[in-house]
Image (cartoon, helix red, strand yellow):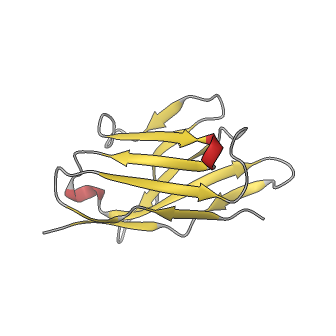
Amino acid sequence: QVQLVESGGGLVQAGGSLRLSCVASRSIYSINGMGWYRQAPGKQRELVAIFTSGGSTNYADSVKGRFTISRDNAKNTLYLQMNSVKPEDTAVYCCNVNYGLPYRGSYWGQGTQVTMSP
């Protein structure tokens, strides 16, 4: 019922920047529970940044001050601006959106790979 499509991943040098995008097939105007997660090889999926149900933002300690989550409701798009990228940021990044009625459910995108270039 809802599709999420991420883009913007790729190779990045240490200290560089990337902007990830997640386009939803349904409106995100009234959605507050959505965010970005990542999973590195051999590790569990972890929270990167989210908009909470209260409308505020939370970040993993490891990305505070470097990453910024934002949204464009008119474009049904969630963003993750990644600055000062570090080798430990290498992972598959996925967006997650929690919809209420009528699409009730927690939806995930397919993920976009972020890799540090040598």
Q: At which x and y percent is residue 18?
A: 32, 54
- Outermost residue on the front side: it is 74
- Would residue 44 be visible to someone looking at this image? no
Q: Is residue 27 left or right of residue 87?
A: right
Q: Is residue 10 left or right of residue 103?
A: left
Give residue 109's quadrant in the image: bottom right
Q: Quadrant of the C terminus?
A: bottom left
Give the number of marks. Answer: 0
Q: Residue furthest right?
A: 102
Asked if one can make out residue 54 in the rendered structure from this viewpoint, the answer is yes
Residue 14 in the figure: left or right of residue 17: left
> Where's residue 75, x and y in %?
61, 48
Task: Name the residue located 17 percent from the left edge and 49 percent from the top edge.
Answer: 15
Image point 51% across, 32% down: which residue? Answer: 57
* Above or below, 13 relative to 58: below
Picture coordinates of residue 82 (x, y %)? 33, 48
- Quadrant holding the N terminus: bottom right
Give whichever of 70, 104 is nearer the camera: 70
Residue drawn where x is 81% and y is 55% of the image: 103
The spot of residue 59 in percent (x, y) is 43, 38
